[in-house]
C-alpha cells in the first residue's frame, strides 16, 4: 500500500477532551539540596583550577588529590540525581504506552481510510477506461465505409486530486549480495560510501590485538586516559 499524508484542516472538526497532565513531584527540599551540592562543586572546581600548570612534584601530588576530589564529586552528583531520574522513568513509561496506544489507533484508521480511497480510485479508473472504450467503438461504428476511423486516444486516467490527501512513494535499498557490492566498490564501479566499516568490530579487534592487529587498511591506535582513584 502506498503512503498517504493527510494535511490537517484549518480548524479541527471535533473537540478532543484533554487529559490531565501528570505532575512530577520533586523532593520538598530539592532546591536547597541542589544549592548546597553546587556550592560544594564550586569549591572543588575553584581548587582544581589552581593547578593549570604543574612545576614540581609537590604540585603534582596535590594535583592528584584535586583530581580525586573531582572524581568523588562526580560520583556524588550521579548518586544525587539517580533517584530523581528513576522517578521520571517510572512516570514516563506509562505516558509512552498511552502515546503508542493513541498513535497506533490513528495510524490504523489512517491506513484503513487510505485503502478505501485507493480502492475507489481504482474502480473509478476502470469505469472511465470502459467508457472511453465504448466511445471508441461507437465512433468506429458511425464511420462511413471505406474511411478509416480517426483513432480515439485514451488518455491515462489520473485520479482527481482529493483535498487534504498527498500521495507519496518511498524507496529503500536492500543488500542481497554483500560480496558483489564490495567487489564493485573495489573495481571503482560504485562509490566507497556504499560500504561502511563495522567500527564496533574494528575497535574490539584493536583493543584485543593491539600492536598485533593485522587487518589490511586498518591501524590500531592507542588513546590514553587519566583516571583518578579515590
Image: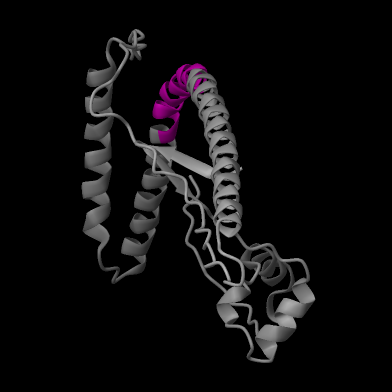
Q: Quadrant of residue 78?
A: top left
Residue at 22% x, 33% y: name it: 39
Nearest the camera: 136 or 162? 136
Of 64 and 35, nearer the camera is 35
Front position in the image: 153 or 163: 153
Which residue lies most toward the front here?
145
Q: On the picture, is 36 further left or further right than 143?
A: left
Residue at the outermost bottom position? 187
| Location of residue 82 in the rendering, given as x and y in whole percent from the top left corner | 45, 27
Q: Residue at x 23, y 55 (%)?
A: 49
* Residue 147 can be seen, yes or no: yes
Residue 127 lies in magenta, yes or no?
A: no
Side of 46 relative to 176 (left or right): left
Q: Is residue 213 visible?
A: no
Residue 86 among magenta residues: yes
Q: Which residue is pictured at 58% across the width and 40% down the height?
A: 127
Above or below residue 114? Residue 159 is below
**Residue range highlighted in magenta:** 78-96
Instruction: Give the image location of residue 165, x and y in percent.
Output: 40, 39
Which image quadrant is residue 56 in? bottom left
Determine whether 127 is above or below 173 in the image. Answer: above
Residue at screen point 35% across, 14% down: 24
Q: How many marks?
A: 0
Decide whether the magenta segment is chiefly helix, strand or loop: helix
Residue 128: percent from the left, percent from the top? 54, 44
Q: Is residue 119 above or below residue 153?
A: above
Q: How was this image coloured? A: one colour
10 vs 161, nearest the viewer:
161
For the N terminus, which image quadrant?
A: top right
Q: Position of residue 208 (x, y in %)?
A: 73, 67
Amino acid at each position: 500500500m502506498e503512503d498517504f499524508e493527510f494535511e490537517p484542516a484549518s480548524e479541527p472538526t471535533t473537540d478532543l477532551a484533554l487529559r490531565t497532565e501528570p505532575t512530577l513531584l520533586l523532593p520538598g527540599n530539592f532546591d536547597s539540596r541542589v544549592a548546597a551540592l553546587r556550592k560544594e562543586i564550586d569549591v572543588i572546581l575553584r581548587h582544581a583550577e589552581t593547578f593549570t600548570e604543574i612545576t614540581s612534584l609537590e604540585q603534582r601530588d596535590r594535583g592528584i588529590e584535586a583530581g580525586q576530589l573531582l572524581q568523588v564529586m562526580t560520583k556524588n552528583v550521579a548518586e544525587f540525581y539517580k533517584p530523581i531520574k528513576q522517578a521520571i522513568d517510572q512516570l514516563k513509561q506509562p505516558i509512552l504506552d498511552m502515546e503508542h496506544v493513541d498513535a497506533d489507533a490513528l495510524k490504523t484508521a489512517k491506513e484503513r481510510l487510505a485503502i478505501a480511497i485507493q480502492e475507489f480510485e481504482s474502480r473509478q479508473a476502470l469505469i472511465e477506461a470502459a467508457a472511453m472504450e465504448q466511445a471508441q467503438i461507437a465512433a468506429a461504428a458511425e464511420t462511413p465505409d471505406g474511411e478509416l476511423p480517426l483513432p480515439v486516444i485514451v488518455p491515462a486516467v489520473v485520479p482527481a486530486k482529493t483535498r487534504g490527501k498527498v500521495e507519496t512513494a518511498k524507496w529503500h535499498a536492500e543488500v542481497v549480495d554483500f560480496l558483489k557490492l564490495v567487489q564493485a566498490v573495489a573495481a571503482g564501479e560504485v562509490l566507497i560510501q556504499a560500504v561502511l566499516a563495522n567500527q564496533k568490530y574494528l575497535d574490539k579487534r584493536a583493543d584485543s590485538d593491539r600492536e598485533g592487529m593485522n587487518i589490511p587498511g586498518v591501524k590500531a591506535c592507542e588513546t590514553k586516559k587519566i583516571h583518578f582513584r579515590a
